Image: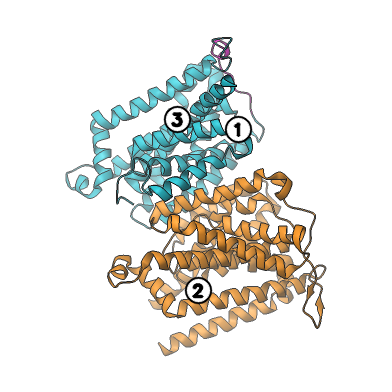
Amino acid sequence: MTQVVLFNIFNGLIVGAFYALMALGLSLIMNLSGVINFAHGGFLAIGGYLAFSLIPYVGFWGGLILAPILTAVLGLIVERVLVRRLYGRDPLYSLLLTFGLAFMFEDGTRFIWGAQSLPYQVPGWLLSPLSSDYFFLTGYRLFMVLIVALAVGGLFFILTYTRLGMRIRAGTLDLETVSVLGVNVRVLRNMNFGLGIYLAGLAGVLAVGQLGLQPTIGSSLIMPSFVAIIVGGLGSLPGTLLGGLLIGVASGVTTVYFPSATEAVMYVMMAAVLLVRPRGLLGEEGRF
Amino acid sequence: MGSDTLKNQAANVVVWLLLLAMPYWLPHVGGYVELGSRVVVLALAAMALNFLLGYTGVLSFGHAAYFGLGAYGAGMTIRYLVPSTGAGLIVGTLVGAVAGAIIGPMIIRLRGVYFAMVTIAFAQVFYFIAFRWNNVTGGDDGLTGWTRQPLHLGFATIDIQQNPVAFYFLVLAVFAIAVGVMAFLLRSPFGRTLIAIRENERRARFLGIPVDQHIWISWTISCAVVSVAGALYALLNNFVDPRALYWTQSGDFVIMAVLGGMRSFWGPLIGAAIFVTLQDYLSSQTENWMSFVGLFFVLVVLFFPRGILGMIRRKVAS
C-alpha cells in the first residue's frame, strides 16, 4: 500500500510539474499583458509534435533543445501579428482571439500529424527502472523532474538577475512608469510572451513522453493550469509553482482512494481557496 | 429620443415577426425547422450571457456549466422522475439557477480576467461530474433513453414529439417569456443600476449601491436563463452529452454575443443566427470545421469587435 501511495504521490508530482510549467508561462503573460492565453495548450501540443518530427533528424537531445525554441519563435510571431493589437482593449477580446487560436492549433496538429496517438521514442536507458523496489522510479521520470526544476530555476534566475527579468517584474507592477523610464514596452511584452511560450513548448516536449502525443493534449492540460494559478494566487509566480505541484499531488493521492474524483479534487481545492483566501495562497492583496 | 424609441419598437416588431414566421420561411432559404429551433435556443443562451456581459459588464467564460446543468436537469427528470416536458423544463431551470446562486458568492468579488478564469474553472467541475458519473449521466456517451413528451395543457394535447413546427413554437414561447423577463428587468431601476455598475463601478459603490449583491443577482438571473436554454436544448436533441458543459461551449456563447453586438438587446440573437448557421454549414462541408470556427473567432475579434449591430449603430450615428 505504501508503495502505491508513494507511486501516486510521485506521479502526481510529475503531473503537477507539467501543470506548474504551463501555468508559469500563462502567469507571466497574464501578469504583464493582462492576456489569458487560451492557446497555451495549443502551443504545448505544437512543442510536443515538433519534437516528435525533429527527433529522427537531430536526436533526442536536439529535439529537447530545438522544439521549445521553435515553439517560442511561433509565439513571438503570434504576439507580434495578432495579440499585440488587442493590448489596452477589454480582456474579453484577447481571450476570444486566443480561444480561436486554440481551436486552430488543435485542428491544425490533427490535420498535419493525424488524430491518432503517435509513438514517441524516449532513449532506452532512460526507461529502465532504477530500483526493483520502487519500480516507478524510471530514469525518464527523474529526468523530467530534473528538467522541470532546471527550467523553473532558470526562469527565476532570469527574472531576478537579468535586465530583461527585472524589466518584466517592474512592468508587472507598473507598466506605465517602466515605459516612461525608456524601456520599449512593445519589445518587452513580445519577449515576455516568447518566454511564456517557451515554457509551454518545453512542457509539451516532456509531457508527450509521459502522457502520449495526441492533438487534444493541450486542451486537457490547460484547465488544471488555470486552477494552479488561482490556487497559488494571481500575480505570484512562486504561488503558481506551488499551486501546480499541490493540485498535482492532490489528484495523485485521490487516485488511490477515490479514482473517479481524480479531476474533481483540484476544483474542490480551488473552491476552498476562493472561499477562505480569495487572492490565492501566495497572492497579493488587492491586485485583482 | 422620440424617434429612437419608435425605431426600437419597429425593430422589435420586425424581430418578432421574423421569429414567428421562421418555420415557414426558413425552409425556403435552405434551412430546416430544427435549425430554427437551434438558433432560438442558443440565442436565448447568448442573450442570457449578455445580460451579464453587456449590461452588467462582467465577463463570464463559464456559462456552458449552467447550460449543461439545465440540459441534464431536464433530461434526467424525464428519464428518471416524471415523463413530462414541463417538469423537465422547470427542474432543469432550477438546477442551473441554484448552482449559479451557490457559486456566485465565491466569485462576485473578482473582476476582469480573474472573474473569467474562475468561471471557466468552475464550469469544468460540472463537466467532470457529467463525464465521470457513468451510471447516472451516461458518461461520455451521453444521456439517452428518453424523449420529449407530448404537452398536456388540460384542454388539449400538443404533439411536440413528432411535429417539429409545434416544438419550435414551444421553444419560441419559452424564449418569449425569458426574454420578456430580461427586458423588463433591464428597464427597471434594478437594470439601470446594473448599467451604472458597468459604466463606473467605483462611482456606483460610492453612491451606496451594494455592488457585489447586484452582481450576484445579475449572475444568478443570467445562470437561470441560460439553464432554461439548456433545458430546451436537451429537449430539442432528445439527448444530452458532456460537450454541452465543455468550455468550448462557453466560448461559443461569448462569440455569439460579441458578433451580434454586446451593447444591443437583440445583438446576441443575430450573432447566434450567424454562428449556428455557419457551424451547421461548415461541419457538413469539411472535417476541419474547427479551424474555420477558430479563424472566425480571430476575424470577429480583429474586424468586428463592436459586433454587427454596434457597427450599424455607429454608421447611422455618423
Residue B307 shows up from this direction: no
The residues tagged by marks 3 and 2 sit, at their Cα atoms, a distance apart of 45 Å
Q: Which x, y percent locates residue B16?
A: 61, 80
> Which label number is shown at residue B265?
2
Q: Which x, y percent locates residue A182?
A: 18, 43
Examine the rendered structure and indicate whether residue A246 appears above or below residue A5. below
Q: Amino acid at mark 1?
A: Tyr
Q: Residues within 10 Å of mark 2 (few under 14, many from 20)?
A: many
What is the count of numbered marks? 3
In the rendered image, which quarter contains the N terminus of chain B? bottom left
- Which chain is rendered orange in the image? B
- The part of the image, by quadrant, that contains residue A165 is top left
Q: Amino acid at mark 3?
A: Leu
The residues colored magenta run A118-129
Q: Is the magenta region chiefly helix, strand or loop? A: loop
Contact between marks 1 and 2 (CB within 8 A): the answer is no
